[in-house]
Image (cartoon, rainbow, N blue to C red):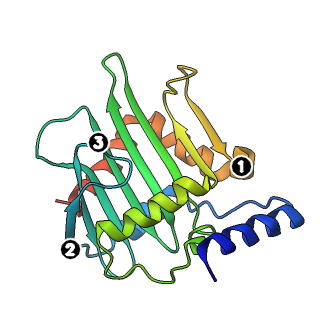
Amino acid sequence: MSKLLVTAWMGFFAFVIGAQARTAVPVAEVIRQMAAQSLPRQDQALVFGYDSLQSCLYSNDHLSVFRHYCYPVGSYPARAYTVISPELGAIYFYEEDLGDTVLREIAIEIFPDDLPLYGEESFAGWKIKDWNGLFSFFYDAQNAACWATNYSRYTKQPEARCYQDDISNYPAWSQEAMAIVSDVNAWNQILETLLQQTP
């Protein structure tokens, strides 16, 4: 069955039965699973959505981590990581020094419930070019996503929101994520763990 047909059927099915909350894996569980893995470096290239700086891919047969802005090596005002697996979905960690504040953000870019829409059961052995196909697919699909940030560029305030979903469906996740982005020490611990796994 083609990916387009699968997407259409899933959309129709969701419309018929009504919107249901997806699985928002706790941030602590994402970090626990990621930190427990051996993640050899597999690839380095431009990732979909990043136009100038390359990302490095660290992965095994079960889980992958992208360290964005990894090449060319330098000092950049932003740090970003994507953790992705069939069980976790795609979780994005982003920090940027805006001068007057440091923006911190955690986002569920792809829920694990939505990953099967791409039609792949395993991501084992994938290189960045393979992942770019998946990222492009979900960008065009405009799938649901949720985020928590200490500083919204639009409201200039902390916020937790969703796109194509309602943040009220994920009270535990939004409370945990907001607590992390609001606590510099908790945030730095997570980024240090991510860096240790992606040297």
Q: CA distance from mark 1 to mark 3?
A: 27 Å
Residue lying at 19% horizontally and 69% vertically, measured from the top left: 41
Residue for badge 3 = 79
Which sits in the foreground, 26 or 69? 69
Spot the residue most to the left. Answer: 73
Q: Is residue 38 at all visible to an observer of this figure? A: yes
Residue located 30% across and 18% down the image = 99
Tell me what residue is drawn at x 10 percent, y 46 percent: 73
Q: Which mark is residue 103?
A: none
- In this rendering, the answer to whether 99 lies above or below 198 is above
Mark 3 or 2, nearer chain start: 2
Is residue 28 something that shows in the picture?
no
Q: Are marks 1 and 3 in contact (CB under 8 Å)?
A: no
The Cα atoms of the two marked residues, 3 and 2, are separated by: 20 Å
Numbered disc 3: secondary structure: strand
Q: Nearer the viewer, residue 47 or 156?
A: 47
Residue 35 position, x and y percent, is 33, 67
Report the Cα–Cα distance between label 1 and label 2.
Answer: 35 Å
Q: Residues within 10 Å of mark 3 (few under 14, many from 20)?
A: some
Image quadrant for the C terminus? bottom left
Amino acid type, callout 3? Arg
Q: Is residue 103 left or right of residue 15?
A: left
Q: Is residue 46 above or below residue 2?
A: above
Rendering quarter of residue 116: bottom right
Q: Give the residue pinned by disc 1.
A: 165
* Callout 1 secondary element: loop
Q: Which is more N-terminal, label 3 or label 1?
A: 3
Q: Position of residue 171 (x, y in %)?
A: 69, 49
Above or below residue 168? Residue 89 is: below
- In what element is the residue under mark 2? loop
Q: Residues within 10 Å of mark 1 (few under 14, many from 20)?
A: some
Which residue is identified by label 2? 40
